[in-house]
Image (cartoon, helix red, strand yellow):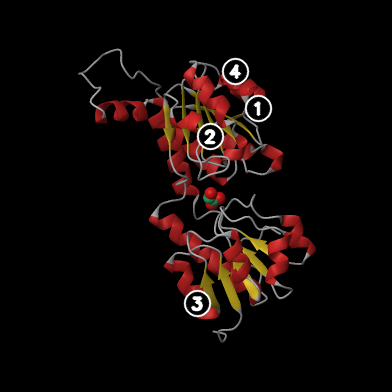
Amino acid sequence: MQNKSGKAVVARVLLPAGLELLEQRFEVSQGGLDVTREQLEEMVPGAIALVPDPSVPVDGELLDLCGEQLEVVSNFAVGYDHVDLEACSDRGIVVTNTPGVLTEATAELALMLTLSAGRLAGDAERDLRSGLWTGWNPGAYLGLELRGATVGVVGLGRIGLRYAEMVSALGAEVLYTASSRKVEAEKQFGFGWTDLEDLLRRSQVVSIHAPGGEGTRGMIGRRELELIGPEGVLINTSRGTLVDSDAVAEALEEGRLAAAGLDVYDGEPAVPESLLSAPRCVLLPHIGSASHISRDGMARLAAENAIAVVDGLEPASRVV
Ligand code: GLV
């Protein structure tokens, strides 16, 4: 092992599985969960490796504050829409992320939201807790069964594909849309490729697995919700920017959408008031990858990527 040299800045926190590796190689400082931009700007000068998470915007200004010795932005997440890739490339800084290790946890969470939103578990539990449950009612909380339902998967990357396999195993027909066709998955699982508009029209469940960023901002707005229609269930475990939250809340209030299950929000941790009070909506606090296995895997991979770049090796998962 090389001698400990150089400074690594973890913008917020890294779990021990990764932190211990990082500390063997670098002098490490962590900003903590409540770090402010100002505090981060004071911490980063001299860093050779910067480890942000999805709540930390990494822009040219921050990179310049780190200084010319900065070699790597090792993102502690798979999504990197908060990192200005062009600014990194322009400065010769490598960007890495943590794909693969969180696929199972995130696909399972999307499945959980599909089942809990589709079966109105959020409303049912809230009613029970607040004393509104008055007994077994054959007409109450009627929801969706996956067998025979059409599930539309928007984005068939690792997580979208795993989710598609899961709902398919429960008897759903899968349609997908993606930037490129996945012929193997079509052959192996019988998934059908189509465009977004057709998918929205034909699916009872629409689950979003596309990346965030300007290219996908507002992908699901009023018009798209009309296409999903009053029998439809919308699931989002990718990034909040893809979905117009107010439009979702309005559609739920007005009975133009059957249910929604959301784990991510534009501007999180703020959650729009309209969604908090909307019916038939299960809301989670961005916990897609929150299993012990996944979060340890992410922390380890983020540390290994940072160390590899500084050691002059190719990191396992390079973005640019
Ligand atoms: C979490 O949101 C991730 O992108 O890993």
Identify the disc placed on residue 309. none
Tell whether label 4 touches label 1 (CB within 8 Å): no
The disc, 2 or 3, on the residue closer to the chain's N-terminal end is: 3
Give the residue pinned by disc 3.
Answer: 23
**Which residue is most to the bottom?**
3
**Disc 2 to disc 3, C-alpha distance:** 44 Å
Give the residue type that dot 3 points to. Glu
**Disc 3 to disc 4, C-alpha distance:** 52 Å
Choose mark 2 or mark 4, whichever is in front: 4
Residue 82, horizontal then vertical, whole percent: 64, 52
For the C terminus, which image quadrant? bottom right
Observer-nearest residue: 222 or 297? 222
Q: Residue at x 54, y 26 (%)?
A: 248
Give the residue type that dot 4 points to. Glu
Choose mark 2 or mark 1, whichever is in front: 1
Give the residue pinned by disc 2.
Answer: 189
Residue 179, horizontal then vertical, whole percent: 69, 38
Left/right placement of residue 20 relative to residue 193 reads: left
